[in-house]
Amino acid sequence: MIQIPKVSLRLAIFIVLLFSSSAVLAYWFTPKLETQAMPENFEVSVPKQIGQWTEQPNPYLQVGLVDTNDKDIDQPYDRVLMRSYNTAEGEPVMLALAYAREQSQDVKIHRPDVCYQAQGFAIKSRQVQTLAINDQHQVQIVRLVVTQPARLEVVSYWIRIGNEYPVTPLNMRMKILRDGLAGHVADGILVRASSIIEDESQASVAFARQEKFLRELVAAMPSNQASVLAKF
């Protein structure tokens, strides 16, 4: 017959308090979602008329939003939009939005630098710029010139994680780490504009056009939805 060891009342109380305090600490140190409510479906909130640009079909297939050749996979995103716009003067811009409600070290926004390379592009140049998206707010935007044998493309994008705009993998990891240590899990979004060009000498004009388009995109959206793209 197995004998159950006797436990003093004092030791029993100590064990109960130990387990109770562990449960409380686990609750307090579990990261909490620090994000706004899930944004409206981008198909609804993003206008089909943005300034002088109107949504139009585009013969070019946009590069996918994940670093895989399977373009049907949009994870880790909760909201995705890929559209093409053009002006009456023929100034096409392709728009891609990818929103994720939770950012972690294992599941985070995929950087276009990696996605383009994974889909057969070589990066010819990369620059980081500060873009004023309105009179009061700025974002850190990355400019890429990428190429395939039959395609030359310029890309402007920013990634927002919480209230920051990381431009390198280390920036992203450190932002997520800081949030985790503070007990928070931030949301994130990729905002990407791209254009096909014939010659690299056209890149500066294409970048300027994309940045104008992105500013007008923010201005055209309802303020509560525009704040998903950039923290106001």
Image (cartoon, rainbow, N blue to C red):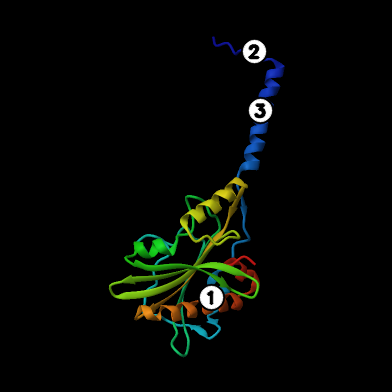
Q: What kind of element bears circle 3?
A: helix
- Against 37, residue 222 (above or below) is below
Q: Which dot marks residue 18?
A: 3
Which of discs 3 and 2 lies nearer the camera? The answer is 3
* Of 20 and 138, the residue lying toward us: 138
For the question of whether residue 178 can be seen, the reply is yes
Indicate which label's residue lies in the foreground, 3 or 1.
Answer: 1
CA separation in Å, label 3 and label 2: 19 Å
Q: Compared with residue 138, is residue 176 higher up or lower down, i.e. above or below?
A: above
Name the residue type under label 1.
Leu
Quadrant into which the N terminus falls: top right
Q: Which mark is residue 214?
A: 1
The residue lying at 63 percent from left, 60 percent from top is 36
- Which quarter of the picture shows residue 123? bottom left
Q: Is residue 209 above or below residue 162?
A: below
How many numbered circles does the render carry?
3
Out of 176 and 25, give the one closest to the viewer: 176
Q: Residue at x 40, y 81 (%)?
A: 202
**Amino acid under disc 2:** Lys
Q: Residue furthest top?
A: 1
Instruction: Please state which amino acid type lies under the numbered disc 3.
Output: Leu
Residue at 67% across, 31% down: 20
